[in-house]
Amino acid sequence: MTSKDSGRISENQPVANANNYFGLQLYKMLAKEGKNVFFSPFSLSTALGMLFYGARNKTMQEMKTVLGYEIANIKNEEIKFFSNNSFLT
């Protein structure tokens, strides 16, 4: 791992934390004892992240909470930057 990679990892850590939070919360809601569950937290958070760009006011705040952006202390303007760059790295 190069120092450039290390910087990129720490730079993206808030988004990773938000995605982990979202995935675990969703799993808790979907999982049933004795049943299998399969979903892609990354795909869902990416799709919902795109919807977040068009959300306003209360809807934006609710999505920010559900997607874990609030708990990860990610500012609204950073969300688009991190989401777009996740496809480039």
Image (tube, rainbow, N blue to C red):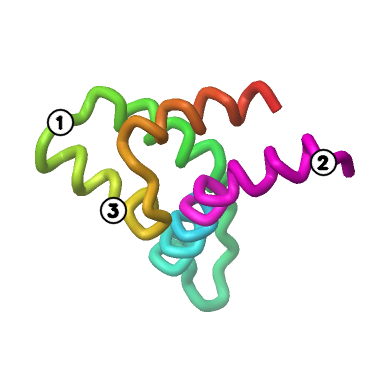
Q: Closer to the N terminus: mark 3 or mark 1?
A: 1
> In the rendered view of the protein, which quadrant contains the C terminus?
top right
Gap between marks 2 and 3 measured at Cα? 32 Å
Residue 40, how many percent across, how many down? 57, 45
**Label 3 – label 1 distance at C-alpha:** 13 Å
Mark 1 lies on a secondary structure that is: loop
Q: Position of residue 22 (x, y in %)?
A: 44, 55
Residue nearer the viewer, 41 or 61: 61
Quarter of the image with the N terminus is top right
Q: Is residue 71 above or below residue 4?
A: below
* Mark 2: amino acid: Ser
The Cα–Cα distance between marks 2 and 1, rounded to whole angstroms, is 38 Å
Numbered label attached to residue 3: 2
Give, as a three-letter code, the residue at label 1: Arg
Residue at point 51% right, 77% down? 33
Of mark 2 and mark 1, the one earlier in the sequence is 2
Q: Measuring 64% from the left and 48% from the top, which residue is drawn there?
A: 10
Question: SS of the residue at dot 3?
Answer: helix
What residue is disc 3 on? Answer: 65
Give whichever of 10, 65 is nearer the camera: 10
| Image-quadrant location for residue 79 | top left
The single residue placed furthest to the bottom in the displayed view is 33
